[in-house]
Image (spheres, rainbow, N blue to C red):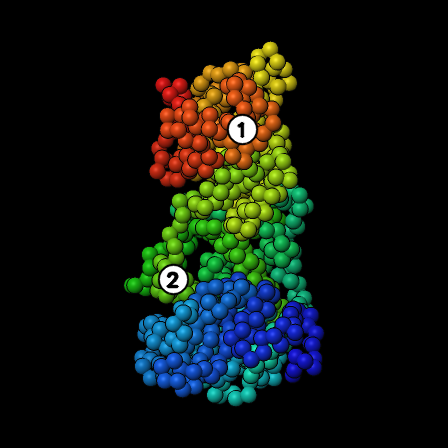
């Protein structure tokens, strides 16, 4: 089959090969490998995020001898096919890799073979080889794809999977029973090929698929054709043996109600899942999820767990299925906790029993016993992990698992991995070593921060500092255009999983509710509230209007109160404490001319902070104040009438304000938005967890504002 002569049609997979693009790469097998890998990774029906690997073998000059030698380029440890680059490949001498068979001592010692892969490295700049390296190296084909397609795994995880594979492909696809990936599995693939020469691929029981070709294109097409055939077979048989998942047991609430219920419950769930370390949440009510969680077979299939190793490494051995009516009244947090707590306790005990039963003498210590996946029949699926991307990917993986169960049940009977096999993957010493190599979490990892007025100025600087330290941030403002620009900036710098944007007017309680609702759905709740939105009006007392007064007090005082009130409601549901930081002003402590409304409103903000600190301590919610002064850069406050008013009050020109303010400080410093952001981080970064009701001045040193 040639790419130039025929462009095949597929229904269940995406054919993305571009002849013109491939022609530009002709002769560069590594570039074609990367191109093929990116195409395969772009279709999540073919493989899940971070799953699968691809390879090619070609002749290259040995830098030590000058002789031509075969080199295998294969996806290295970690990374994702969809975004694979050359830096993500490992390059090894094929002959050296195969010669390791001479020193292999058996399956009990196969983990030690991984270290020996390093002695086979051809390109010293290449990525560390993965555990799947010998699976590619022991096969002779020039181009190989190893993927985890839902359709293929459904057959691989079916009770009659081997028979179905034989009948469906007429003996052209081999079968290797489940075995943990590693050196020995590579030998089994070679043995399967030796016993069945001429096959076009191998199905790995409860795992995935290997396919190959003489060229990058032939491998790509072969892979698509095999997966297409698996998917078509499942579609043809779906519903013939019995209704999907046994048919519906219950219905879902209408979407608007599902979203409201999910938003209302997820902070409580997050609190339980964060009992060891703070987690970020994700929610989906995807149709595939709803079909599964509302089915008669949910109670039978959910406890069985997943099959493919990639699935349960991301989702744990099994989900927690909530015993909670979809239309449950969530207004009483204590009553809801009374219902949920025994369910979480039971899950933790189940996980601990699984660990104790399956552990080996050298197994790593038991990890977090809380669930990763939580299913609420009638509503949807929640997932929790150390960051948003991992939580989102866990949801994607469990949807993969649902697809596998659905397909396997359509053609046979779904079988999951035995608990011991699952444990041997989850607590594999090589997996543990990989976890230990991960960077240490940043100070605000797992935390969620909402900063009002964060489309610019001080607010945006705080949001950036928090995001830099690992937090998820909720950007908001009443200026839609400015908020959109801030969102683009955060997208480019941090990516989609770190922030959301929400149009918010702090004087409008409904927009505040909407913002917290979005924060809960996106990340699971809220940990840090920073009241930063503000405005300024500078006038002599006789020129101040009632409207001026009301506007200042509505934005500064009532706004702070409303945002705090709704924020702590979520914090209390989480039952894990929290932080409120109020950006007030030096003017709360210092009297000055033409400043009656603004200065008194700032004083009200300051005292409201003290009152809140006194009241919320019992909830482990800390309330602190940062007092800036004259932060002019990127501030809307310092444009227009306010700047002119302050300049007039001091008898100077507007352009002289920055230097004027700096000169009046003890440190002779201009105060920047980043200085205020640093002060906020001091309160939440972990070193001042026992501090509340405090005021931190960031004004360059003004003696009149010293707190007495």
Direction from residue 92 to residue 404 in the image, left or right: right
Would you name the residue on which mark 1 appears? Answer: 655
Q: Residues within 10 Å of mark 2 (few under 14, many from 20)?
A: few
The C terminus is located in which quarter?
A: top left
- In three-dimensional space, the C-alpha distance between marks 2 and 1, rounded to whole angstroms, equals 56 Å
**Residue 184 sits in quarter:** bottom left
Single out the residue that lies furthest toward the left: 361
Would you name the residue on which mark 2 appears? Answer: 434
Residue under the point 51% across and 83% down: 141
Is residue 425 among the parts visible in the rendering? yes
Direction from residue 260 to residue 526 in the image, left or right: left
Single out the residue that lies furthest toward the top: 542
Mark 2: secondary structure: helix
Residue 433 in the image, given as x and y percentages of width and height:
35, 62
**Residue 46 sits in quarter:** bottom right
Decide which of 149, 644 is in the foreground and name it: 644
260 relative to 356, above or below: above
């Amino acid at each position: 089959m040639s790419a130039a002569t025929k462009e095949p049609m597929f229904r269940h997979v995406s054919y993305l090969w571009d002849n013109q693009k491939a022609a530009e790469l002709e002769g560069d097998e590594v570039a074609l490998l990367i191109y093929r890998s990116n195409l395969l990774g772009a279709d999540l029906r073919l493989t899940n995020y971070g799953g699968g690997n691809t390879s090619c073998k070609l002749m290259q000059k040995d830098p030590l001898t000058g002789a031509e030698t075969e080199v295998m380029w294969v996806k290295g440890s970690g990374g994702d096919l969809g975004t694979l680059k050359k830096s993500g490949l490992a390059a090894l001498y094929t002959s050296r890799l195969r010669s390791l068979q001479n020193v292999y001592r058996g399956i009990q010692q196969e983990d030690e073979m991984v270290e020996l892969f390093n002695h086979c490295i051809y390109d010293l700049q290449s990525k560390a080889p993965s555990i799947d390296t010998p699976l590619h190296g022991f096969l002779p084909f020039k181009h190989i794809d190893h993927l985890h397609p839902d359709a293929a795994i459904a057959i691989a995880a079916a009770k009659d999977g081997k028979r179905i594979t034989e009948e469906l492909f007429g003996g052209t696809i081999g079968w290797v029973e489940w075995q943990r990936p590693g050196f020995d599995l590579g030998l089994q693939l070679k043995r399967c090929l030796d016993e069945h020469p001429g096959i076009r691929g191998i199905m790995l029981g409860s795992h995935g698929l290997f396919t190959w070709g003489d060229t990058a294109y032939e491998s790509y097409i072969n892979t698509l054709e095999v997966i297409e055939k698996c998917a078509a077979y499942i579609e043809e048989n779906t519903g013939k043996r019995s209704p999907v998942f046994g048919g519906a047991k219950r219905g879902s609430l209408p979407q608007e109600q599902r979203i409201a219920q999910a938003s209302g419950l997820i902070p409580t769930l997050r609190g339980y899942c964060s009992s060891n370390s703070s987690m970020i949440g994700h929610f989906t009510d995807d149709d595939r999820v709803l079909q599964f969680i509302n089915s008669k077979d949910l109670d039978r299939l959910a406890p069985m767990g997943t099959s493919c190793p990639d699935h349960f490494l991301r989702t744990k051995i099994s989900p927690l299925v909530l015993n909670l009516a979809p239309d449950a009244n969530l207004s009483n947090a204590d009553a809801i906790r009374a219902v949920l707590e025994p369910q979480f306790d039971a899950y933790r005990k189940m996980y601990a029993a699984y660990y104790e039963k399956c552990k080996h003498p050298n197994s790593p210590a038991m990890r977090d016993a809380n669930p990763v996946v939580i299913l609420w029949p009638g509503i949807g699926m929640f997932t929790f992990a150390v960051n948003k991307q991992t939580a989102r990917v866990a949801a994607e993986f469990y949807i993969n698992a649902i697809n596998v169960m659905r397909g396997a049940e359509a053609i046979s009977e779904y079988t999951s991995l035995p608990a011991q096999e699952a444990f041997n993957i989850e607590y594999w010493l090589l997996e543990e070593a990989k976890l230990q190599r991960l960077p240490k979490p940043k100070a605000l990892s797992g935390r969620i921060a909402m900063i009002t007025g964060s489309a610019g100025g001080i607010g945006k600087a705080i949001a950036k500092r928090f995001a830099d330290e690992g937090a998820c941030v909720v950007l908001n403002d009443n200026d839609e255009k400015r908020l959109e620009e801030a969102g683009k900036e955060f997208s480019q710098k941090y990516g989609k999983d770190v922030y959301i944007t929400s149009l918010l007017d702090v004087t409008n309680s409904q927009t505040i509710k909407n913002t917290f609702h979005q924060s809960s759905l996106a990340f699971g709740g809220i940990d840090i509230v920073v009241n930063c939105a503000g405005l300024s009006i500078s006038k002599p007392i006789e020129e101040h209007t009632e409207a001026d007064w009301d506007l200042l007090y509505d934005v500064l005082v009532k706004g702070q109160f409303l945002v705090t009130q709704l924020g702590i409601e979520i914090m209390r549901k989480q039952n894990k404490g929290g932080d409120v930081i109020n950006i007030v002003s030096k003017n709360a402590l210092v009297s000055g001319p033409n400043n009656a409304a603004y200065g008194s409103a700032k004083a009200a903000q300051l005292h409201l902070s003290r009152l809140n600190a006194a009241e919320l301590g019992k909830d482990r919610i800390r309330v602190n104040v940062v007092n800036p002064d004259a932060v002019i850069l990127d501030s809307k406050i310092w444009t227009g009438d306010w700047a002119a008013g302050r300049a007039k009050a001091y008898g100077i020109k507007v352009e002289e304000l920055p230097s004027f303010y700096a000169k009046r400080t003890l440190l002779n410093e201009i105060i920047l938005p980043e200085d205020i952001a640093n002060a906020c981080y001091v309160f939440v970064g972990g070193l001042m967890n026992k501090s509340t009701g405090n005021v931190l001045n960031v004004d360059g040193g003004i003696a009149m504002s010293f707190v007495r």
